Amino acid sequence: MRAEPAGAATPNGGAPSGAAPSSVATVDGVRIDAAAAFRLLLLSAPDEANNAVRQLVLDRVAAAEAAALRIGVPAAVVERELERLLAEQERRVAEASKGKRDLAAHAKATWGIERGAYVALARATLERSLLLERVVLHELALHPRVQLRLLRVKERSLAEEIARKLEQGADFAALARQHSEDGSAREGGLYPPLPSDVPSPLFERTEGLAPGQCSPVHEVATPDGPRYRIVQLLARLPADGGDLAARSAAIEQLLDARALSPTELEAWMRLMEGRHEIRFHGLGSNG
């Protein structure tokens, strides 16, 4: 989950320079409270407001877990990713303004802050995002895991034809790229290792499989109607009870190669639901 801006550049969190942390503006010396601004945002753009709340919850849980796991983000990684992020935002600002404005001018005109303050906000947001990635992967490594490939198609006849080809030695990844409508198709149906002690529909029909074996065709319900799925078990991995430094190094190497998967984040969130007391308060709540 990288800290990528939706527009040219958007600092996440913090208050405008010179403003009290709990206010967003003043009128004749009377403060307009940030909570009032949030309530208005919740009414006019509920998805964006709720996503912001969920992100704050994730950040708080990740910080607590990082302290418990005794992990952090290497300083060199923060600097490298910050340089990459700022360069991308500079490019987007220049493109949007047709070369008439740079990131410093954009931050000043949009939020009334100097470039240094903007960079500080971007760094803090990025550090939270990078920490979440590492917390998720450390936690998942502490559980026994299953890695698999998945192929899902709309027609049963096509699924059965694919199953016959697999029995004859066809390559699962190639068939998934060619036929699968699952989001993993581009990667040949490959899913990252996921904790086997967290119930998941991904693991259906894998219980008796040995590494390399495929499940029979089975029907699954989706919002778009029935689909037909085949799963190939790649590996069963034990929980990593080894050295923290070695695990950290392996995770850094993994994140150099790929981003955190949404399925990994989802599995971690399910684990955290059983560990932390998390309550979401609706509009008008005093909690």
Image (tube, rainbow, N blue to C red):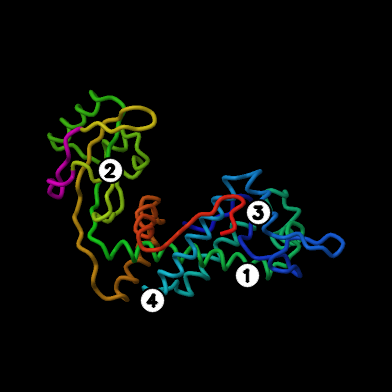
Q: Which residue is mark 3?
A: 38
| Mark number, residue 30 | none
Mark 3 and mark 1 in contact? Answer it, CB < 8 Å. no
Earlier in the chain: of badge 2 and badge 4, it is 4
Amino acid type of the residue that numbered disc 3 sits on in the rendered structure? Phe
Local crowd at mark 3 within 10 Å, few (<14), some, or many (≥20)?
some
Q: CA distance from mark 1 to mark 2?
A: 42 Å
In what quadrant of the picture does the C terminus appear? bottom right
| Mark number, residue 70 | 4
Earlier in the chain: of badge 4 and badge 3, it is 3
Question: Relative to residue 113, is residue 231 drawn left or right?
Answer: left
Q: Which residue is mark 1?
A: 120
Amino acid type of the residue that numbered disc 4 sits on in the rendered structure? Arg
Name the front one of labels 1 and 2: 2
Q: Nearer the viewer, residue 30 or 229?
A: 30
Q: Which residue is mark 2?
A: 201
Question: Relative to residue 6, is residue 256 drawn left or right?
Answer: left
Residue 9, position as x, y percentages in the image:
64, 56
Main SS, magenta residues: loop
Earlier in the chain: of badge 2 and badge 3, it is 3
